[in-house]
Image: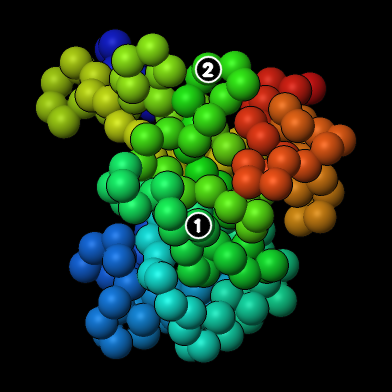
Amino acid sequence: RGTDGASAGVAYNCNLVTCRASSDVLIDASREVRGVSDAYINAGNRADVKIISMSMGRITSSSQIRDAIRYAYGKGKLIFCAAGTSFSWTSGWYGVIFPATMTEVSAVTGVRDNDPYTTCTVCHDGSQTDFTIVMERGSDSQHPLTLASYGDVPSTVGGSSVATATAAGIAALVWSKYPAYTRAQVLNKLIQSSSNYPSINSSLGWGKIDADKATN
């Protein structure tokens, strides 16, 4: 957490476990598939891990990754994956990427803050999308603030990757407020606190999660 002017994370006081599973955000090489699978299995086996967030993916599915995610899901983990971030010309014609397409996963994408809100310039959406987070200003495409590269002057960042981490952070806030909740109860709290509830949008899911509403 920033104490001298720097920004703070959504769930800055949570216990965070990180796994470097791939060399970049595209899960392509066989060693990257193996790395991601191992990371899910490792998280699944850890009793101190309740939420898994991954902002990586691929166009085609992988049975090895699918099995690992189902293993972690079977261990009671709440899993978030990025719907996809690419170029402005590809995000419009390709929908949600794997593994965010899986039913065991909550797919998250970024949207603009205009009303009615639309997907951010480089973000993917589709029928598998569950939640959205504002990642872009409608008037000038400016992204939200993030931690500084150095010093205290904040930087900016956006896309479905950051939206996914933010949604996972909000889920952590909910679970810390209601520690006796099950995974299903936490997920239901997020759904009921989202902008489209009780309806679901065909390409943007339950919509924007209201963190304040979800924790009060």
Task: Identify the secondary structure beneath mark 2.
Answer: loop
Q: Nearer the viewer, residue 181 or 116?
A: 116
Relative to 125, say whether 20 is above or below. below
Q: How is the image coloured?
A: rainbow
User: Of the numbered discs in the image, which one, if any, rests on residue 95?
Assistant: 1
- Asked if residue 10 shows in the view, the reply is no
User: Of the numbered discs in the image, which one, if any, rests on residue 114?
Assistant: 2
In the picture, residue 172 is in which quadrant? Answer: top right
Looking at the rendering, in which quadrant would you find the C terminus?
top right
- Name the residue: 54% across, 62% down: 100
- Name the residue: 24% across, 63% down: 24
Q: Position of residue 13 (x, y in %)?
A: 50, 34
Q: Nearer the viewer, residue 89 or 85?
A: 89
- Name the residue: 63% across, 42% down: 204
Q: Earlier in the sequence, mark 1 or mark 2?
A: 1
Task: Identify the secondary structure beneath mark 1.
Answer: loop
Q: Position of residue 82 (x, y in %)?
A: 48, 53
- Asked if residue 44 shows in the view, the reply is yes
Mark 1 → mark 2, Cα distance in angstroms: 21 Å
Give the residue type that dot 1 points to. Answer: Gly
